[in-house]
Image (cartoon, rainbow, N blue to C red):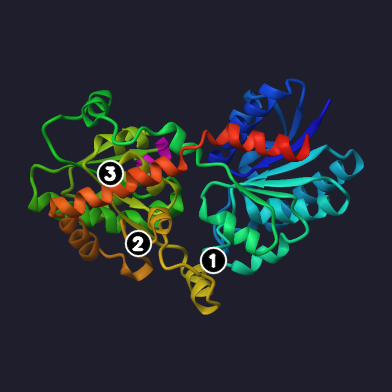
Amino acid sequence: MKRVAIIAGEASGDLLAARLIIALRGQYPDIAFEGIAGPEMQAAGCVSLFPLEKLSVMGLVEVLKHLPELLSIRKQLFQRWQANPPDLFIGVDAPDFNLPLAAKLHATGIPTTHYVSPSVWAWREKRVRKMQGKLDLMLTLFPFEVDFYRKHGINAEFVGHPLADEVEFDASRETARQQLGLPLDRRILAILPGSRSGEVRRLAPDFLQAAARLQHKHPDLLLATPAVNARLRAELEQLRQQFAPTLQLTVLERQSRTLMQAADYILMASGTAVLEGMLSGRLMVAAYRVAPLTAWLIRTFGLLKVRFVTLPNNLANEELVTEFLQEQITPESLEQAMEQMFTLSEERRSYILQRFHELHAKLRQNASHSAARAIIRQFF
């Protein structure tokens, strides 16, 4: 019986890893999985040795206070698998935790793969050196990443993006609105300031003020936002009262994807959600703001290596999504960008949506099964 060690670092990685486990078990039903797993992975049959939440830490500065515990967990896992080696180690995302562990395990003779390339092509490019000779296979979600890794002597394979397999392009607005109980006859702007408390605190004040300005100018515009839990819902309401007390905002329980499909336009935090918006075929403005010290480190040491920050723009190598960073984010700049989006020419609107459709088709590769096939081909 084959044993696989597998680690995911947050909810998105948990879902990705669970689907990979199911796809691998479809070919090898008796594989045993253990590592760091969330509820999806555990439901797929993975034994979790530590809680997934221990790894869900974002940012350069933010991780420092959790570093001793993270290093302790990594040491315990290495000792466990060194003493009883698995047939394969799979790191799913969480590169700052998984890649150093993969390097140590690889040095003991354990085969290693990493699923979801870290954005070394975008920032902190020197990290790729730490993978050379220490990783047997990199599974990438985007096609352009393969050339980058092969250029650095690392075996890589594009397997597609699982969201492209899930999300229907340009799904019916009417159906989504009926599911959410939203009116069919109004323009809807979806506001998505992030799914983490830090993101919301840094972005929501500007988002909400911009939304209030737009609502004042366009009384027919309905503003709606998803809240991932009761705590963030309360935080959003507090920020609304503080920064945009006149704003009429419809707050939904979760359902961010359905809201994106229900919307005509989206104002959102940059991240995977922007990719989801592209795959849904919706026009967007995206913004992101990190902690001031993190921003200073990125700028001072030239860590950002790409022209664009959002994934759709990087995939297309052109600006299809208007994006703002750090001090560029103001209620005025966001309002102006949204107004420009409202008044796009039909030619420009059609071009953007056509490019989104092409990118959706390119990423739709039945990712979990493609990843499983690549792993089986190389390691089993």
Q: Quadrant of residue 169?
A: top left
Q: Main secondary structure of the magenta part?
A: helix
Mark 1 and mark 2: Cα distance apart in space: 18 Å
Magenta-drawn segment? 228-234
Residue at mark 1: 123
- Residue drawn at x 30%, y 39% as measured from the top left: 260
Which structural element holds mark 3?
loop
* Lower position in the chain sequence, tag 3 or tag 2: 3
In the image, residue 58 sits, relative to residue 130, either above or below, namely above
> Is 232 inside the magenta-drawn segment?
yes
> Which amino acid is tagged 1?
Trp
Indicate which label's residue lies in the foreground, 3 or 2: 2
Q: Name the mark on residue 58.
A: none
**SS under mark 2:** loop
Residue at 68% of width from left, 28% of height from top?
24
In the image, is 56 to the left or to the right of 289?
Answer: right
Left or right: where does residue 35 sit relative to residue 336? right
Real-space Cα distance between discs 3 and 2? 17 Å
How busy is the neighbourhood of tag 3: few (under 14 within 10 Å), some, or many (20 plus)? many
Amino acid type of the residue that numbered disc 2 sits on in the rendered structure: Glu
Look at the image and tell me in which quarter the C terminus lies: top right
- 177 relative to 291 in the view: left or right: left
Q: Look at the image and tell me whether residue 283 can be seen.
A: no
Task: Residue 81 in the image: state x and y as whole percent.
Answer: 85, 42
The residue beneath circle 3 is 282
Give residue 318's mark.
2
Q: Which corner quadrant of the image does residue 30 belong to?
A: top right
In depth, the one of 96 and 241 nearer the eye is 96
Q: Quadrant of the N terminus?
A: top right
Horizontal and vertical percent for residue 103?
Answer: 78, 55
Q: Examine the rendered structure and indicate whether residue 62 appears above or below residue 241.
A: below
Identify residue type, mark 3. Answer: Arg
